[in-house]
Amino acid sequence: MAGLVLDAVAAGRRTERADGGGSAEAGFADSASTPMSTVQDRIWFMHELAGSNLYTVPTFLELDGPLDVDALGRALTVLLARHSILRTLYRASAGLPRPVSLPPEPVVLMTVPSTEEDAVVTAAQSRVFRLADEIPVDFRLVARSSGQHLLVAAFHHIAVDRVSLDLLFTELGVRYGEALRGTGPVDPLLEPAPRYSDHARAERDELATPVMQRRLRARAATVGAALADGGAALLARSGPAGRVGGYPLRLANGAIQLALPDAVGVDEAREINLSGQRADGIREIGPDGTVRFESWAAAVLYQETGYDGVEMPLDRAEDCARELAGRFAAYRGQVERNPGYQSVAGGRGRGTGTSELARASGTRTGADT
């Protein structure tokens, strides 16, 4: 996934900058030399194809205790200055995405009253980013009452994942403490974070190595030879010849054949696939493509998201998928906002308070005394 810090740290340990490392990215112009990871490529493609909030990551941080809003704004400014992936646009050129890192700018943290909380939360959950024109993060602060605030953040998945968000908010505590004490770096660019582009470059470099190229060419040649010259190759594919689930296949003599283990027959393989399908909550997929859910799965969907449907006809699959995506985004936001809520999927709301931010930075607030 498009990790903000974790993968970049690993990449930073594997790669060396030609300029010795440690300095900020030279310039902010669009450059074909700035790589994207293969995962980012896929996310960008799916985002452009769907144009929805499917990859929006709404995040909510409960802040209990005295809060210095200006210091929080300065802390967020340092974060975006240090992590260029949070201020990167993705513009298409010849049908391919080209990342463009914008210069760091101060984060103006918009504060709204508690009467607008529902609207701000809903906006974060339904946010559809225009990746070519706006950075993949947005912050709002809800002032609930004296000593209580809600930081509402919307991220795009092309820039963060769940692990990197945890690291990001841990660093926010450090930067907030620095801002309170006035000890942060004068120029955050003098203390840049490991760059995700370094990870992406390392990945691309690895794929371009002679060893990987030979493997890729060999795999392509093997499959091609099986089709063209009557050779044989083993593959794994879903739904061959209309069958349910996935099966090992052999390409031989220009034909595709099942390649089941000797002890497994076709009927048993089909039942194995069907049992997995039922475990996923799907009772059956009809001849016309209609997906019919198990009653327990439909009940869970309705209870947790409000989605009311026991089947999904093929001609409505796209509309149903969009509705489910929207409802799941709202559900995910509800789970994230409630620190004590344990979801069916195991997700838990963020409950980090101002005092925890301060503890991460070594300072104290009234909530700690």
Image (cartoon, rainbow, N blue to C red):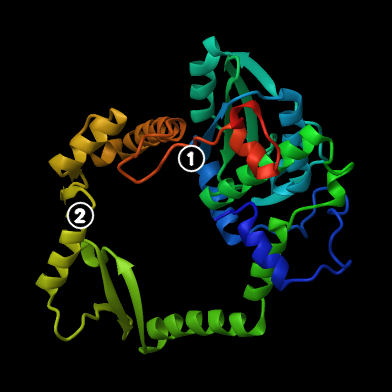
| In-front residue for pair 364/96 | 364
- Numbered tag placed on residue 279 in the rendering: 2
Label 1 packing within 10 angstroms: few (<14), some (14-19), many (20+): few
How far from the left and from the top, in percent, is residue 138?
Answer: 64, 31
How far from the left and from the top, in percent, is residue 156?
Answer: 58, 41
Q: Is residue 160 above or below residue 203?
A: above
Gap in angstroms between the C-alphas marked 1 and 2: 28 Å
Q: Is residue 363 above or below residue 244?
A: above
Q: Check contact, mark 1 vs mark 2: CB within 8 A.
A: no
Q: Is residue 190 above or below residue 221?
A: above
- What residue is rendered at 81% in x and 39% in y? 104
How far from the left and from the top, in percent, is residue 351?
Answer: 50, 35
| In-front residue for pair 92/178 | 178
Q: Is residue 114 above or below residue 183?
A: above
Residue 291 visible in rendering: yes
| In-front residue for pair 69/223 | 69
- What residue is rendered at 77% in x and 32% in y? 180
